[in-house]
Amino acid sequence: MDQDGKVFRIGDYEIDIIVHGFPGKSVCHGSLGFSTIALISHKDRIALVDVGSFGQRSLLQEQLAERGLKPNDITDVLLTHSHYDHSVNWPLFRHARIAIGGAELDWSLQQPWGETVVPEFYMQELAKWPTLQKVGDGDEVFPGITAHMSPGHTPGSLVFVLDTGEGDMIFTGDACKNRAELLSRAADMTYDAAATQATIEGIWALWSARPGNILVPGHDLPMVLEDGVPRYLGTREAAIRAWYAEDLNQTTIISLLPDNEAVARSAAE
Ligand SMILES: [Zn+2]
């Protein structure tokens, strides 16, 4: 594993978390949509687990280019759920096989226009797309990756479990967005608290099944379990750049790190 908690080489797999999701929302401006995007390379296939929001579109393209990859090199897109901050860039990878929960897609198509964070028209188009794969509970969606039906955040959310042969990597999407939800067994956005609790208990069971298993939430850093306690892997990076001055070239960077992480960072520097 690299020190940033981003690149993991396990067995025949390289897992590169190209964007660490952020566990928060803005106070005055609605949702941020800073979600996790992960790249999984295995033999001649390359998958993305979630593809981010519009705001992450150029970031995603830059991150792929930095790795010498073009969108057409992606062979598989695995969507944890249909919300815009995880799904809306699928057209960039329209040549890939695009997997989403069948129940999720059906539910998404029934959502009233303009009222939810489901990107209505992107889901309508996806439903007709020739490379769409509608996934059910227990389906293998990529070599070594099994989908687990995980309702609560949305009815058809999927958790993807990658069995590398040397431990599992568990991509929870927003079935469990961050460490606070993991520890609370409750969620900030849920249509059914009991379903969310059962899903998060199921995630704990998958995670604790083998020592060293890595959990990758939809809006937080990856974590491992140590003596039953989650420990973050890597370093959180989160900041906003603002034009508060009168000069276009002068910007102010505002850290979004919690105090303890900012203190630890400056002590290490
Ligand atoms: Zn999300």
Image (cartoon, grey):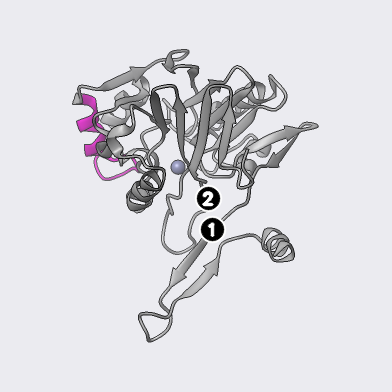
69 to the left or right of 170: left
- Left or right for 50, reference 27: left
Residue drawn at 38 percent across, 43 percent down: 64
Kindly identify the amino acid type of the residue bearing the numbered disc 2: Phe
Q: Give the percent coordinates (x, y) of residue 259.
A: 68, 63
Query: Relative to residue 70, is residue 219 drawn left or right?
Result: right
**Marks 2 and 1, Cα distance to the nearest angstrom?**
7 Å
Segment tinted magenta in the rendering: 113-127
Residue 258, above or below 233: below
Classed neighbour count for the residue bearing mark 1: other residues with Cα under 10 Å, few (<14), some (14–19), many (≥20):
some
Mark 2 beta carbon near ligand 1 (under 8 Å): no
Residue 265: give x, y in percent of width and height: 68, 61
Closest to the observer, 72 or 115: 72
Regarding residue 35, the answer to whether it shows in the image is yes
Question: Is residue 39 or residue 141 the one in the foreground?
Answer: 39
Residues at discs 2 and 1 in contact (Cβ within 8 Å): yes
Q: Is residue 48 above or below residue 57?
A: above
**Residue at horizontal 37%, vertical 42%?**
68
Q: Does 65 sit above or below residue 246?
A: above
Magenta includes 122?
Answer: yes
For label 1, the residue is 238
Looking at this view, name the residue that lies furthest to the right.
Answer: 227
The residue identified by callout 2 is 22
Magenta highlight on residue 261: no
List the single residue furthest toward the front.
68
